[in-house]
Image: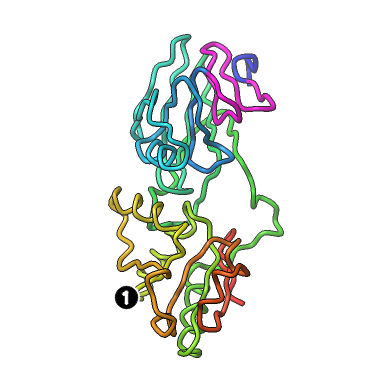
Amino acid sequence: MANASWIRAEPWGIHLVPVDCWIDPARPVERALITHGHADHARGGHGETIATPETLAIMDLRYNTRAGVRPVAYGETVRLAGGVDATWLPAGHVLGSAQVLLEHAGERVIVTGDFKRRPDPTCAPFAVTPCDVLITEATFGLPVFIHPPVEEEIGKLLSARTANPDRCVLVGTYALGKAQRVIAELRRAGYPEPIWLHGALERMCRLYEEFGVELGDLRLVSDAQKDELRGAVVLCPPSALSDRWSRRLPEPITAMASGWMRVR
């Protein structure tokens, strides 16, 4: 960068110096620009929080952050006092996730937080945007991480279900983003049956539906008789895979959706 002094990496976030504003700060600040709702990027307690409407709704659900919020749509530019323009663009990671394009002193810097290039039916696709500097998280950036095609893993899940009609397929998956993607990919593969949820996943799935993401027939495991779950697909948080909660399930075949799903 010709003038690196206007944007700095600090231990608790990215500081936009001319406007005294932070991106994804790990502690409360007067003004925060948030890329998405995962806990390592979003938190409560800021004086003002600027993010997409979907991210703000996720933050309110998780952290009760209704006060001091400013929604910004994809493609919308916010002029921050001090001469920095910030534009929110789709990042393709989870519902409402954004890249923030920052323009100042003739330079274009994009901060993505997490992003994903593969298609995901539950969120807007990543928007390739020219810039001078790209600042991104790279959780799975090393060459050792090669995720298999989504269709293959969903096919393995459905094959395991078909081959074991008296058991269930139990998928450990995170409440924000992964659970909804697994459900949507199952629907895209033509799976019409009820998908059963651990209670910890329900509220986020319902929020996705409020924003127009169709997930089909979702039911709570707590409302089911054990025999109803034979041949079923069940989703739960990863921590519940070996928890006492799973004992109510009929001989589960387990899978884990992290970078992407692996059926065991």
Q: Toward which corner of the image does residue 59 lie, by quadrant?
A: top left
Q: Split into 4 quadrants, where in the image is the C terminus?
A: bottom right
User: Magenta stretch containing residue 10, yes or no?
Assistant: yes
Above or below 180: residue 103: above
Magenta residues (range)? 8-29
Figure check: 19 above or below 52: above
210 relative position to 61: left or right: left
| Image coords of residue 115 (percent x, y) | 52, 45
**Residue 105 at x, y percent in the picture:** 52, 13
Left or right of 216 on screen, residue 106: right
In-image side of 212 versus 199 (left or right)? left
Picture residue at 43% right of the left edge, 57% below the top: 119
Mark 1 residue type? Pro
Query: Which quadrant of the rendered structure holds the N terminus?
Result: top right
Q: Residue at x 63, y 45 (%)?
A: 138
Quarter-of-image position of residue 143: bottom right
Considering the numbered disc 1 on the image, is that residue within a helix, a strand or a loop?
loop
- Residue 213 in the magenta stretch? The answer is no
Question: Can you give x and y, in whole percent of width and height, for residue 140 in the image?
Answer: 64, 52
Q: Is residue 121 above or below residue 185?
A: above
Density class for disc 1 (Cα within 10 Å; few <14, some 14-19, many ≥20) is: few
Q: x%, y% of residue 145?
A: 67, 59
How are the colours assigned in the image? Answer: rainbow
For residue 239, which quarter of the picture? bottom right
Name above or below for residue 163 compared with residue 153: below
Residue behind mark 1: 192
Residue located at (35% from left, 36% from top):
53
